Image (cartoon, rainbow, N blue to C red):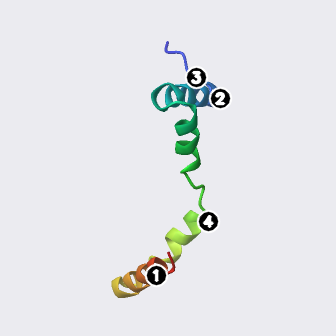
Amino acid sequence: MPEFKTISQIRNEGFAALVKALGPGDAIRYINSYDQGTGDYTAEKYSIQDEDFDTVVARIKKKNERL
């Protein structure tokens, strides 16, 4: 039977692999490049199903203008 690792073990091994491949500083920069995001993805996913294509495109363009 295969041995299953805990999430903690996987995270530790993953970070060790990053440090080995990138070095400590770049490994930290890589980790910091990820964003947890905000909001409730599931609620948003279901709330936009009624929008038509043009509305979705306009919303994406408006969001990109703010970036």
Residue type indicated by callout 1: Glu
Tell me how far mark 4 sits from mark 2, CA to CA.
25 Å
Dot 4 or dot 1: first in sequence order is 4
> Residue at coordinates 62% horizontally, 31% vertically from top-left?
7
Badge 3 marks a residue whose secondary structure is loop
> Residue at coordinates 49% horizontally, 12% vertically from top-left?
1
Q: Tell which tag, 4 or 2, sits nearer the viewer.
A: 2
Residue type indicated by callout 4: Asp
Tell me how far mark 4 sits from mark 3, CA to CA.
29 Å
Dot 1 or dot 3: first in sequence order is 3
Q: x and y percent of residue 52 in the render?
A: 37, 85
Residue type indicated by callout 2: Ser
Q: Which image quadrant is residue 43 in?
A: bottom right
Residue 65 is labelled as 1
Tell me how far mark 3 sits from mark 2, CA to CA.
8 Å
Dot 2 or dot 1: first in sequence order is 2
* The one of 44 and 25 positioned closer to us in this rendering: 25
Q: Is residue 11 left or right of residue 53?
A: right
Q: Tell which tag, 4 or 1, sits nearer the viewer.
A: 1
Which residue does the numbered mark 3 point to in the structure image? 5
Residue type indicated by callout 3: Lys
Image position of 38 with respect to 56: above or below: above
Image position of 35 with respect to 45: above or below: above
Residue 8 is labelled as 2
* The one of 56 and 22 positioned closer to us in this rendering: 22
Which residue does the numbered mark 4 point to in the structure image? 40
Q: x and y percent of residue 31 in the render?
A: 56, 43
Tell me how far mark 2 sits from mark 1, CA to CA.
39 Å
* The one of 40 and 37 positioned closer to us in this rendering: 37
